[in-house]
Structures are given as C-alpha cells and as structure tokens.
Amino acid sequence: MNFDVVIIGSGAGGGMTALSLCEQGFKVCVLERGKQFDPRKDFILNHADWENREDPLKEANLKEQTINQQFRTKIEVDGIKEFRTPLRYHRVHGVGGSTLHYQGEAHRFPTHAFNNRQIFGWGTDWPINYSDLAPYYQQAEHLLGVAGETGNPFKVDRGEFPTPTHALSKRSQVLAKSAKEIGMSLLPNTLALPSISIDGRTPCQHSGGCNFGCIFGAKSSIDQAIIPRAEKTGNLTLLSETRALKLVLDQNGDIQAVECQSTIRDFKITAKAYVLATGAIETPRLMLHSSYANNNDQVGRYFMETVIASLALELEADFQTFRGPPLDSRVWDFSKPENENISGYVLGNSGYLYPAIGPSSHAITSQGIGRQHKHAVRSSFGRNVQLFGIAEQEPVSSNRVTLSKYFDDMGIPKVDVNCAYSERDLHTISEMNNKLQKWAEATPTKSIGLASDSRYRSSATHVGGTCRMGSDPKHSVVDAFGKVHKQSNCYITDASVFVTQGAGDSPSLTIQALALRTADKIANDLKLSK
Ligand SMILES: Cc1cc2nc3c(=O)[nH]c(=O)nc-3n(C[C@H](O)[C@H](O)[C@H](O)COP(=O)(O)OP(=O)(O)OC[C@H]3O[C@@H](n4cnc5c(N)ncnc54)[C@H](O)[C@@H]3O)c2cc1C
Ligand code: SF4
C-alpha cells in the first residue's frame, strides 16, 4: 500500500497526529511497538484480587528499561557529591502509549510558560506563543471531552469546557480548607476523564484506578478516544506489535524508509512523509542509532525529567481517600515564578501512598502483628494522602540522552541519560518541600509521614526536551512547526520537542495540541508537493 505518512508511535502525540491527518484525507500508517489492550479483558480492577494479579500495563512499562541502569549522573546533595540513582523510564508500550496509564490531567500551559525570558528577563523562550497553540488546545480538549470549569484565576480566560467539572473528592475538600488557611487555593483539576458520555463512551465512574487502565474505557486515553475515530475515516492502517528498528536514509540524509520488525516478519515501509512520536527518550535514541539529522550535535540535548517533592499524611478521619479521580485538584498559585532563582511549580494530592495502593498492599505495609496489625490497618485505611509538588526542570544542554555501550535484545544500543540539577532546580525543590510541610501542618492529621523528592527518588514520568523546537538549528532540532531542520520529509510530534515544561503542568494536552498543529503543517506540505 502507498502511504502518505508513516507515524512511529501511537501515544499522546502520535495518536493525535494520526487522527488529524486521517480526517484530512491522508493515508496513514501507524507503527506501534506494543499491543492493543482491551480494557474489559486485559485490565485488572474488575477482579476482587486485582492487587495479586500481574498488571499488564506495569509489564508493558518496565519490562525493558531503555535507560542503561549502570550510568550515573554526578550530583551534589546537601553539599555532598554523589551519584544519582539512574532514572527509570515510566512509559507504556501499547496502542495509546503512556496515556494508557496516565491519570488524565489535561492542562493548557500558562501563557508565561512560553516566554519566560521575554516576560521576566531570564529562562528560555519557545519559538511560539500561547496564542499559536490556543485553537489546537481547544480542538484537543473537545476530542478528549476534558472536564473542567472556567474562572481559574491562574489560567488564561477561555471558553466553556466540553464536559462539566468533577465534584471534589472528600480528601480534596479537606485539603482545600487547609490550603485556604495558608493562603493557597486548591482548585478542581482539568481532566481528560469525561464527566458525561461523549462518543457513546461510559463517563468517568470515580473509581480512582486510572493508573491501572480504565476498565470502563471512560478515560480518554488515545486508544479509546482517538484511534477509533481515526479508524472510522478508513484512512488508518495501525500495525501494533511492530517496532521501528532504524531509519533508512538516502544520499541527502533524508528518510527513505523505516526498517521494522513485527511478530511475523521484518520489513521496510515507505511513505511521502515520516513522523517520529516514540517519546522523549526513544525518539532521540532512534535518531542517534540511525545517524539522522544530528550534524549540530543537538539530538538528545536539553533533556528534562519530572522534578517532584512529596509528603505523606494520615488524615485524622476516614475520608475514603482512594475514591475520586486520582488527581482531582491542583494548587496553581506558584505557577508564575517569583524570581529567577525559582521555577514555576504546582502542588496537588493523590489518595494513595506508594507502594500501598489497595487494601492488601496497605495491610502488607502496615506495622505490627496480630490484633495490633489489624487495628493499624483498620484505623488507617482511607486516610492516607500524598501531597506533592511538580516543577519544571531548567533546560540545560549537558542534560542529555546519548547512546550507551550496552545493547537491548535486538542489538540496538540503550541510552545513557545524564540528568543533573541546576541551582534553580534545587532551590525550587526546597521551596516545594517548605510549602508541602506548611500545608501538612495546617491540615487536621493523625500523623505527618516521610518527605521525599527527586534528589532521592528519580521519576522519569513527564520527560521532555531532547529534540527541542527552535528557530536556530545550532540550538534545536525541529522548527516552530515540528519539522526537522534542513530535512525535507520528517516531523516530530512527541514530548521531545518541548522547550520547557510549562511550570509543572502536565504535558499531554500540550503534546497533543502541538501534534495537531504539526499535522496541519504536514497536510499543507503534502498538498504543496502534489
Ligand atoms: C504514571 C504516569 C501518570 C501520568 N499522568 C499524566 C497525566 O495525568 N497527564 C499528563 O498530561 N501526563 C501524564 N503522564 C505523562 C504522559 O503520559 C506522557 O508525557 C505522554 O504520554 C508522552 O507522550 P509521547 O507522545 O511523548 O509518548 P508516549 O505516550 O510514551 O508514546 C510513545 C509511543 O511510541 C511507542 N514506541 C516507542 N518506541 C517505538 C518504536 N521503536 N517503534 C514503534 N513504536 C515505538 C511506544 O510503545 C508508545 O506507544 C503520566 C505519566 C506516568 C508515567
Ligand atoms: S477514575 Fe474514572 S477514568 Fe479513572 S479509571 Fe476510574 S472510572 Fe476510569
């Protein structure tokens, strides 16, 4: 078959690109390394013994660590030089990519996040403004049925959300009161968990299990909300369990074909245009492994991870903290940075504590034996809360993904990820720790537990950068429309194009809005080349 576009990866960015191009009449083939999950058959939360079952998403997430676990970044913690625990990359191989286990937070980045330097005189600017992305944010929100309410004073004025906001969970109601006492506002989150039925799908049932895959198909992961729509156009060919191994280049250095491996055979696939959407670690890996578009040594640079701080609490009464959408509220008061020593960040809460998630794991991690143990379990279940903060990491050229000397089982090099913290990152982590402590002290609790942060517990969940967007090819990989500099037929539509991380807001909606914008660019380029 002759394809107009081959897209590698069906996650947040790849899935959205595919839908837009299919709806514009192009023949699209999506190559996806993982399998297609069936929520009702594959996910575990409808089984009483779910905690003892193998979680298929965990298996698809951590089975193969792309990141070489021998590589260690040098850092300094409290004046002591040491090596960081290697990052473990949290992502899912499957149709829908990491949206399969995401919690549906759907955030528009704040306007200032695109032009820090222009506004504050420091930081890094994107080559686009919020207004360039606003119509695509709106399009993505409607496709996903995002639930929310207008009037958030920390966000830009906008129209109504496609579905009404979710009521705050009991735990968020308690935490909103204590937040108010210390001058912060805990507001309803904006979530790609539709609160009313869209496209005939079941609306969110507040089960709290988004991380394990939604058994109702209610969560707007790419496989539920986007792929079926793209399939309806008749223009989509989806090849799951098919891995892109290498980009084949012509004499000009442009992509000529993609070498693939499926469960059945090895083959090459060609198209008029190619889209890389395998995520911010796999995309530079594929490019570096293929010696593609790296004349300026920019591929893999400006890697950003999730900078987090967290604090465990036991509330004074049973508020069934496990109920409700897992991340139903947010504090945005600190999203605009106070000065150049601090990055923008957000605060939030979730109703479970790793590793205790359900009743069994809660019992295993509770103290005591016999009656004492029973009492400990009964008197604390439903009271556990994790307060957390997420900040953006300063984009630094030396934080980078490079090919490792270790190989995976297909003989493809893994990656080394160097990820150190700047002074500003460290200052921001300490600010988040202070704010969480104050919030915890203002909350009626039985106990305040352990604090932790990224310096001790690495968290590669919201990864970005590595093929960043910019106007100067000496400091970026793609242009303002996501097209690879100086290449005729390749675009990138995943989190690797990020210039900054939007003041701690969650990335997927921005990945998706950028993907829709790049899809329009691809459509125009293809029409012009006819
Ligand atoms: C636990 C958790 C919760 C999260 N919650 C949220 C949230 O609530 N809101 C939010 O905005 N973000 C959330 N995130 C982050 C979000 O899921 C990711 O940022 C987002 O999905 C990244 O999109 P992407 O398109 O860059 O990559 P991905 O969604 O990871 O997609 C990449 C796809 O490419 C495929 N692939 C990789 N290599 C190949 C290859 N060689 N050939 C073929 N296919 C390949 C992968 O299998 C995958 O399907 C969460 C992340 C985690 C870990
Ligand atoms: S909270 Fe809602 S979207 Fe998430 S798993 Fe439960 S029903 Fe599905």
Image (cartoon, grey):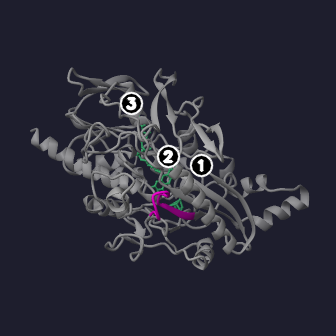
Q: Is mark 3 within 8 Å of ligand 1?
A: yes
Q: Which of 309 and 148 is in front in this view?
A: 309
- Residue 454, labelled with which disc? 1
Q: Quadrant of residue 84?
A: top right
- Do residues under tags 2 and 1 come within 8 Å of each other at their CB atoms? yes
- Residue 15, labelled with which disc? none
- Give the secondary structure at mark 2: loop
Indicate whether 305 appears above or below 195.
Answer: above
Q: Left or right: 530 with respect to 284?
A: left
Q: What residue type is labelled 3?
A: Leu
Span shown in magenta: 337-348
Q: Which amino acid does label 1 sit on?
A: Ser
- Give the secondary structure at mark 1: loop
Q: Does the magenta stretch include residue 131?
A: no
Q: Nearer the viewer, residue 433 or 101?
A: 433
Q: What residue type is labelled 2?
A: Glu
- Residue 305, labelled with which disc? 2
- Give the secondary structure at mark 3: helix
Q: In which quarter of the image is residue 169?
A: bottom right
Q: Left or right: 178 with respect to 329?
A: right
Query: Which x, y percent locates residue 471?
Result: 25, 44
Q: Left or right: 200 with respect to 483?
A: right
